[in-house]
Image (cartoon, rainbow, N blue to C red):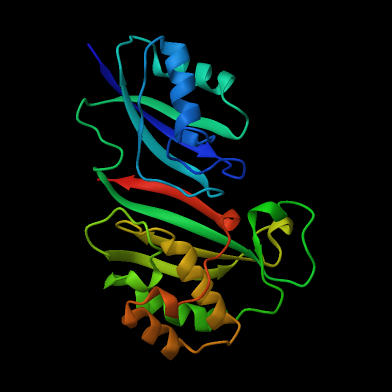
């Protein structure tokens, strides 16, 4: 009898071509399936809560798979972590009801995007930040965050290639915060936090790029609103680099 396993996965996406399995490229899904198939001696196919793009990281990606095994989840977790590269870590492994589905039962996802806001580069962790040299106006950026909160059409922030039937999503919260006083390693860091029912292709990075334009006084909040309402990607800002984006967690009911 097959059992359903749930994984919570942390990964550094720098050297991977995203989550989704690809024939000729290294992906998170591909690495996990290879390791699981080896340990369990059967072909394993896993399903994630959603895709992350090349270079995007995760602190709490969720995936599930079915396997004919009585192996204890803790033993399986240890086995996986011994086989996987250091850039992929299984944080939790559990047995769930047969009907559990990592994607279809997800109620919301939370992303964090990190910016280094200072003239000097950073010696520690710079590969996981987008450096913006001039000071950002966080108050203006948060005015725009208020505009995107709620149920809206996010077509202006959608890159082509989304697998979706609608570009309408519900954003539960969005805000920009300074991490100035959190710790010495976080000095001059700014984080954009967003939680939504789901996300379109590059949606967070496109919002981030446009918010930065507001923070740099290149456009005003009123113009941001006009871009948002226009449903035209060509009007929005550039796509922020993948390296600053982290899938923080996936929430279930």
185 with respect to 62 (left or right): right
148 with respect to 236 (left or right): left
Residue shown at 56%/56% (left/top)?
Answer: 242
Q: Is residue 223 above or below residue 105?
A: below
Q: Is residue 155 above or below residue 4?
A: below
Please identify the quarter of the rendering in which residue 84 is found: top right
- Total residue callouts: 0
Quadrant assignment for the C terminus: top left
Residue shown at 43%/83% (left/top)?
Answer: 224
Please identify the quarter of the rendering in which residue 117 is found: bottom right
Residue shown at 37%/46% (left/top)?
Answer: 250
Residue shown at 51%/21% (left/top)?
Answer: 80
The residue most toward the front is 24
The residue most toward the left is 99
244 with respect to 150 (left or right): right
Q: Is residue 205 above or below residue 21?
A: below
Quadrant assignment for the N terminus: top left
Please identify the quarter of the rendering in which residue 169 is found: bottom left
Q: Position of residue 99 (x, y in %)?
A: 19, 30
Q: Nearer the viewer, residue 153 or 185?
A: 153
Q: Position of residue 50 (x, y in %)?
A: 36, 45
């Amino acid at each position: 009898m097959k059992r359903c396993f749930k994984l919570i996965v942390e990964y550094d996406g720098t050297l991977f071509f995203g989550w989704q399995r690809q024939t000729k490229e290294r992906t998170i899904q591909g690495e996990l399936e290879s390791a699981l198939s080896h340990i369990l001696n059967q072909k394993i196919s896993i399903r994630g809560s959603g895709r992350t793009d090349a270079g995007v990281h995760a602190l709490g990606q969720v995936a599930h798979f079915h396997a004919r095994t009585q192996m204890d989840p803790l033993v399986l977790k240890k086995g996986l972590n011994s086989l996987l590269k250091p850039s992929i870590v299984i944080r939790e492994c559990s047995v769930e009801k047969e009907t559990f589905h990592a994607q279809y039962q997800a109620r919301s996802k939370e992303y964090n995007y990190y910016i280094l806001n200072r003239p000097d580069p950073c010696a520690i962790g710079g590969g996981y930040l987008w450096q913006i040299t001039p000071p950002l106006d966080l108050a203006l950026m948060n005015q725009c965050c208020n505009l995107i909160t709620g149920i809206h059409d996010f077509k202006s922030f959608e890159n082509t290639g989304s697998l979706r039937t609608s570009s309408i999503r519900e954003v539960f919260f969005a805000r920009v915060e300074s991490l100035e006083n959190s710790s010495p390693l976080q000095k001059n860091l700014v984080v954009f936090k967003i939680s939504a029912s789901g996300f379109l292709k590059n949606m967070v990075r496109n919002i981030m790029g446009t918010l930065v334009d507001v923070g740099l006084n290149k456009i005003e909040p009123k113009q941001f609103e006009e871009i948002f309402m226009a449903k035209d990607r060509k009007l929005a800002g550039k796509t922020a680099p993948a390296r600053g984006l982290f899938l923080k967690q996936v929430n279930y009911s």
